[in-house]
Each structure stands twice: as structure tokens, then as C-alpha cells.
Amino acid sequence: MIAADRGSNISYENFTSAVQSSDLLLKILFLSGLVLVLLSGRRKHMTSNLPMKAYVRQGNLIANLAFTNQASRPSFDEEGQDKNGVLVKVISASINPFDYKAPKIMAGKVVGLDFCGTVTQVGKDASSKFKIGDLVFGCNLGTLAEFISVPTTQIAKAAMNWKPHELGCIAVAYVSPLTALKAGQVLDSNYKKVEGKDSILVIGASGGTGIASLQLAKALGFKRIVAICSSKNATFVKENGATEVVDYTNEREMIQFFGENFGTFDMVLDCATNSGHGEDYWNKSVQLLKRNKDYTFSGNYVALNGPPVKLLRYFFGMQKPNEKLIIATVENTSKDLEQIVEMLNKTGARPHTHRFIFDPVGIESGFELLKSRRTKGKIVFDISG
Ligand SMILES: NC(=O)c1ccc[n+]([C@@H]2O[C@H](COP(=O)([O-])OP(=O)(O)OC[C@H]3O[C@@H](n4cnc5c(N)ncnc54)[C@H](OP(=O)(O)O)[C@@H]3O)[C@@H](O)[C@H]2O)c1
């Protein structure tokens, strides 16, 4: 998969009217684009005859999910295709909306992207960095399983004073906002906040990526961190870094906030738009971005999800310079993972977790909570001790 920030030289108006003329074409193109993105990050793994517990996708096009005790454990070829990887016994794995939205043809048989676990086998070329018994965390396709084979470029060693269920939540929920902060030009390539960029608005601030965004913004030293969430989560988001809270369920409060904050933010990080229940903050958020003297934008809007037309602009490299959708990558994330932990260590922040047992009842409860779109922080499964 990828992280992205691609330029454009095709007019937005021409592009928009062209794609709107065929909704079906749009959907087909979007799906084929996503398939390509995901397949590019997938490696075909050999399996052994040994059974393991896993949560799997059945059927290719619809994400029909089922718990099984009879999935095949990955086999691990230390000298061959796994020579740059490790085999991990998974201890904890968290979930993301992608897990129930993506069909097997895109995301593979086993569900899950994030994990923390113990190294049980090491590839020939990975032995200088990792050894059997190391506690590692990271990102891969198929982490809701007892064992996964993963390249070393997608993992980092566990940090001191972190628990496996906390590290098992880090990859997608934190790498995505980190990628967004870079795309929003408030974080430089050395993971330092760009000087003078001090105000950020986080929309959908109480969920998995929202809390991660607040915690990263606080650790980076943003002075003004505004959170949009429902009022019941106001205290929670303040505890995680927000300096102000706006209740999106209160129409009057929202109108007042958007009216009073025209042109005041260095960045808007949108974790809510197009998440499945008609959420749409895109156009009105752009109005909140700071502008230069010539009225061009100096602030940046970055969304983690968006309508098909924005996804198409992303896939075809035609995004507007100050309005971007990003899709985080699973590849080459080791440095990001290490930096995220280092940033959170500055403030002592940790993922806020809801833990479930990895059995048919636990998995159903965890996914029910995720699908409710009311989760505070992250849902994580205790896979093995
Ligand atoms: N681009 C990427 O690489 C990437 C990576 C991860 C996730 N995503 C996408 O990002 C989105 C968020 O993911 P997530 O894991 O953070 O989801 P999540 O944890 O399920 O989000 C739940 C949160 O959404 C909030 N929410 C629901 N409706 C809202 C609305 N109308 N306005 C504001 N907040 C609202 C809820 O807040 P209240 O309870 O306070 O109402 C809840 O705290 C999803 O669309 C996901 O697919 C993209």
C-alpha cells in the first residue's frame, strides 16, 4: 500500500463533472484502484498443516467474517521468501473499520492489520536485527490469527513500559494520522513540528484515529488543539490533548464554531467524513484553513476517508494542493512505529483500549462495538498469552 500526496494538472471542475456523469464507472474505478493498492502490498504466503485460531473472510466480494480454529498456520521459509522477515506468535491485535469493510479479494483471507507479539522464527537476513523471543509490534495483512509472518520493514521492537495490548493498537490508528500530519505539512521528515504551525482541528476526535491524532498533536506541541466529537466524550478528548471541544450533535454550537473560525487553522485532520453514516465535513472545513496574503491557502485539510470523487482524485494523483485524502501504508513503517512510541513517551500517553477475548463471543462483541461507530479509542483482542 502507499502513503500519498500526489500533484495535479487537470482542472478540478472538468474532472468532477466527468466522474459525476457515471456513478457506476466511478465505483468500478474506485474498487479496482483499491484492489491494486492492496494487492501491491500483499505477499503470497505458504501455509503449514498445523491449525490455528483466526478470524477469516469468506466469499471474495462481500466481507463475510467468521471465527475458525482450523485456519492454516503460515509456514516460514528462513532461507527463502521469508529471509527478510520473522514469524510472530500474536499476543494482541486491534481492529479498524477497514477490517469489516474490505472484501477478501482486496484484503486477503485473514482479517486484521495491527499486532503485537513474540518472535518465534527469524529469517536469515533478519537475524542481525531480531532474535527469537523479541517482543515486536507493527502492521501486516492478516493479524487476527495466532501466527503471522511479517517483513522486518513493517515491525519495531517493543519499547520499555509499554504493554502488548497497547502496542497492538499502534500501527493503523497512529500511522494514519502521522501520515496525515506529514501530508498537511505540519510535520517535517525528521518528525518535528514545522515552526509556526500551532493550530489543528481534529474531527471525529474520540475514535481510534481521532484520539491518536490528539495524542500526537499534544506530543508535538500544538498550542491550539480543537476536537469535534459528541459532548459525552468532551472530558475524554481533553484528557487526550484537546484544548477546546466542539459538540457536533449541537447544531447551534457547530454553526457558531465554523462562523467564528474562518481562516484560523494550520491544519484540519478529518477522521469522520465518509465513514459510513453520511458524515461530511470536507467543504466547510476547508473554509477554516489559514490563507496567505494573496488569498491562497497556507493551511491544509487532510482526510482519512472521503467520497468516491476524492478517492479517484487520490488514485489518479489529481488532488488539490491543500485538500488531501491519504491512505496509510503498511510497508516501510518501522521508523514511523518507533517515532510514534517516542512521541507518546514524551507525554506518557497510551492508546485507550477496550479488550476482548479472541473467541467467537469476544470477536462478535468487538466487531459489534466497532460497527456502532461509538468506540472511544481502540478495540483490541487478547489472542494468546
Ligand atoms: N486513510 C487511512 O489510512 C485510514 C486509516 C484508518 C482509518 N481510516 C478511516 O478513518 C475513519 C475513522 O476511523 P477510526 O478507526 O477512527 O473509526 P472509529 O474508531 O470507529 O470512530 C468512531 C468515532 O467516530 C465518531 N463519530 C461518529 N460519527 C461522527 C460524526 N458525524 N462526526 C464526528 N465524529 C463522529 C464517534 O464519536 P462520538 O462517539 O463522540 O459521536 C466515535 O468516537 C474511518 O472512515 C476509517 O475507515 C482511514
Image (spheres, helix red, strand yellow):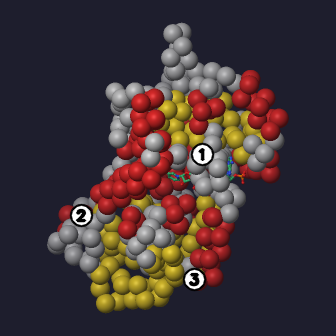
Query: Could you say which is closer to the camera, residue 250 or residue 345?
Result: 250
Task: Please tell me whether mark 2 sits on a helix, a strand or a loop.
Answer: loop
Q: Is the distance from the Cβ of mark 1 to the nearest ligand 1 atom less than 8 Å?
A: yes
Mark earlier in primary sequence (2, 1): 2
Residue 209 at x, y = what percent?
57, 50
CB under 8 Å between discs 3 and 1? no
Up the image or down, 331 lies above or below 126; here it is: above
Mark 1 surroundings: few (<14), some (14-19) or many (≥20) residues within 10 A: some
- Give the vertical position of 64 relative to 278 (above or below): below
Q: Nearer the viewer, mark 2 or mark 1?
A: 1
Earlier in the chain: of badge 3 and badge 1, it is 1
- Residue tagged by mark 1? 273
Q: Residue at x 38, y 35 (%)?
A: 318
Q: Could you tell me which residue is drawn at 80 percent across and 39 percent down?
A: 251
What is the three-letter code of the residue carrying label 2?
Answer: Asn
Q: Pointer 2: residues within 10 angstroms few (<14), some, or many (20+)?
A: some
**Label at residue 84:** 2
Residue 322 appears left or right of 237: left
Quadrant position of residue 366 = bottom right
Q: Earlier in the sequence, mark 3 or mark 2?
A: 2
The type of residue carrying mark 1 is Thr
C-alpha distance separating marks 3 and 2: 31 Å
Tell me residue 345's x, y (percent).
55, 48
Of the two numbered discs 3 and 1 in the rendering, the one whose residue sits closer to the viewer: 1
Residue 131 shows in this picture: no
Tags 2 and 1 in contact by the CB under 8 Å rule?
A: no
What is the distance, in whole Å, between disc 3 and disc 1 at their CAs?
32 Å
- Dot 1 falls on a residue whose secondary structure is loop
User: Which residue position is annotated with label 3?
Assistant: 359
Give 25 or 30, whichever is nearer the viewer: 25
The amino acid at mark 3 is Asp
